[in-house]
Amino acid sequence: MPTHQSIHRIAMLSVHGCPLMMPGARSAGGMNVYLRKITQLLAEHGVCVDVFTRNHHAGGPELLELGPNARVIHLPAGAPELVKDEIVPYLADYTDHLSRFVAEEGTSYDLVHSHYWLSGDVGADIALEWGVPHVVSYHTIAAQKQRAGGAPEPPERLEAEARMAAAADRVFASTAGEADDIGALFGLPPAGLHVVHGGVDTALFRPRDRAAARRAIGIAAHERVVLFVGRLEPFKGPDILVRALAEMQDGGDVRLVLVGGSEEERSAEWLDRIAAGLGVEARVHWQPAIPQADLPDFYAAADVCAVPSFHESFGLAALEAMACGTPVVAADVGALSSLVLDGETGRLVRGHEPRAFAAALEEMLDDPARLSLMGEAARAWATGFTWERSVAETLDGYRGVLAARSERPLVAPCV
Ligand code: UDP
């Protein structure tokens, strides 16, 4: 138990999700972006943050500074190339190495914050051992995913997620709706939940000249462009957009640009097959995942960004598109339902019928004046979602947890 009442040092446990991985391919996405931003900003607020993640890169560094006060520590736990579903047998190794690293350094932490179910049990054990509070963020929840039509998840995940809620001092959710869902799923009272919204870097993701953006990425001025940004997996629904393209009445000049996945994983093969079967392959363009810094040209070049996911916890791509002044057509699910203002910053589509997406996209693409008004409203709306707000909400959550254990905690600079 910390003897002081300040937040000096936080241990972030993220077994499989390293903040240094490039998002948009393999299993890296919104959670990695969130971890990196929150860690950097907490550090700027004077809180030291150590992110403990699995060593996922053979020969990679054990310890990396993300900036002053922020470190990423790679712990051995199974072969680096393992995919996330193969990590479970190595969680005990991760825990041993974590305990050893901390004991050798002689560091102490005020709070443990665990991310995703793979870190849940480890975090609960470590927090208990250190006598400090434990906060968890699910990022995605198996029961929710299954309810939304996702593939069956292993029972060990469902059980671990129930244990996470029961053992945590507080559960962070990314929207009020997700907090309600978690409360209902795991029988948690509102006091056990806290909302930390996702954010967007509005200096990077901002409106820019469409013609210049199109020239930069090789899209002709006359084309109408629908953009998808994210991992190319069925749960994110990119195939719905390929099918929607074929459903459009007057879509000859509409191009679908998919950004995400990797050549190595052959992420677009299944989509190529669908496109070829429908005769729209010439209008589907794939760009394997690129660094975030290169994404604004894509968002700015697009007429509309489409997010047809079956569930989204953060929906960062939707937020980034809006911040660039590009309206969004999204499935009316998860965080997207509150992120996209239907009829103002884009359109929300109920269900996942390609025809419904085609209709919403055509309606928007056919009305450039409205599209442009929506783009302005989207930018204005997205600027409210700063990472500064997310980190303020994070600190509020931590303070609440520490206050529940001791009285009146303060944030104090680390020494
Ligand atoms: N992303 C990226 N490069 C890409 C594709 C995606 O950096 O080629 C980033 C994107 O900017 C966003 C994140 O990956 O911040 C995806 O987050 P989102 O919440 O949209 O989806 P998730 O991955 O959480 O399902």
Image (cartoon, grey):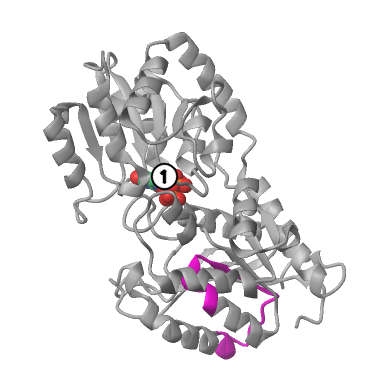
Indicate the position of residue 63 as horizontal and vertical percent values: 46, 74
Would you name the residue on which mark 1 appears? 310
The answer to whether residue 283 is above or below residue 83 is above
Can the viewer see residue 136?
Answer: yes
Q: Is residue 246 left or right of residue 171?
A: left
Looking at the picture, which amino acid does disc 1 mark?
Phe
Query: Residue 55 lies in magenta, yes or no?
Result: no
Q: Which of the pair 206/199 is nearer the observer?
A: 199
Can the viewer see residue 291?
Answer: no
Residue at image coords 29%, 23%: 215
Indicate the position of residue 9 as horizontal and vertical percent values: 67, 72
Name the image quarter holding the C terminus.
bottom right
The answer to whether residue 75 is above or below residue 386 is below
The answer to whether residue 378 is above or below residue 333 is above
Indicate the position of residue 74 as horizontal and vertical percent values: 43, 75
The answer to whether residue 146 is above or below residue 411 is above
Q: Is residue 31 left or right of residue 395?
A: left
Q: Which of the pair 173/322 is nearer the observer?
A: 173
